[in-house]
Amino acid sequence: MNDPTTMTTITTWQEYKNQAKDNYTNENYTQALISYQKALQKLQEEEEHQRQGNNSNDNSNSNNRHYQHESTRKVMEQQILLSNSVACRLKIGGLEMAVVAVEEAKKVR
């Protein structure tokens, strides 16, 4: 997947997550960690963008319920990405790196 002639532009957090899974499966833990971090960043950007859009849009009950459901789903995805980052850090550098990842995870809501 790292061959420049076959690389495609990644634009979504899901694509970064899939890339990370592939790298992890192939025991390329450093690249997997980088991709999980990029996925997390993209997911957080998407959440912020959606939050801003929700503030300016109609505040009907159905709109609020949809936003709350999406928000809950994205928090769960963030937790998965952070958990996978911990697994990568354990593979790369053992306990010390995993502790760093756990501290980062605690910062998420």
Image: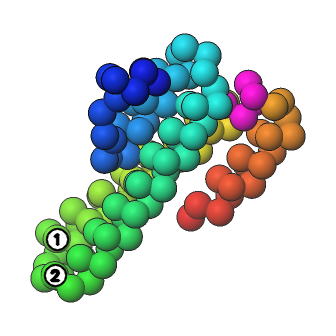
For the N terminus, which image quadrant? top left
**To which residue does mark 1 refer?**
63
Residue closest to the far right: 96
Label 1 crowd bin: few (<14), some (14–19), many (20+), radius 10 Å: few
Q: Is residue 79 above or below residue 72?
A: above
**To which residue does mark 2 refer?**
57
Q: Which of the numbered marks, if any, corresponds to residue 79?
A: none
Residue closest to the far top: 26
Q: Is residue 83 visible?
A: no
Q: Is residue 77 visible?
A: yes
**Is 23 or 102 nearer to us in this picture?**
23
Q: Is label 2 in a helix, a strand or a loop?
A: loop
Task: Say whether residue 103 is magenta.
Answer: no
- The answer to whether the residue labelled 1 contacts the one labelled 2, judged by CB atoms less than 8 Å apart, is yes
On the image, the x and y values in percent for residue 37 come to 55, 46
Q: Amino acid at mark 1?
A: Asn
Whether residue 3 sits left or right of residue 63 in the image: it is right
For the magenta stretch, what is the residue range?
A: 88-92
Q: Is residue 104 above or below residue 36?
A: below
Q: CA distance from mark 1 to mark 2?
A: 9 Å
Question: Toward which corner of the image does residue 53 lie, by quadrant?
Answer: bottom left
Label 2 crowd bin: few (<14), some (14–19), many (20+), radius 10 Å: few
Between marks 1 and 2 in the image, the one whose residue lies nearer the viewer: 2
On the image, the x and y values in percent for residue 54 come to 24, 76
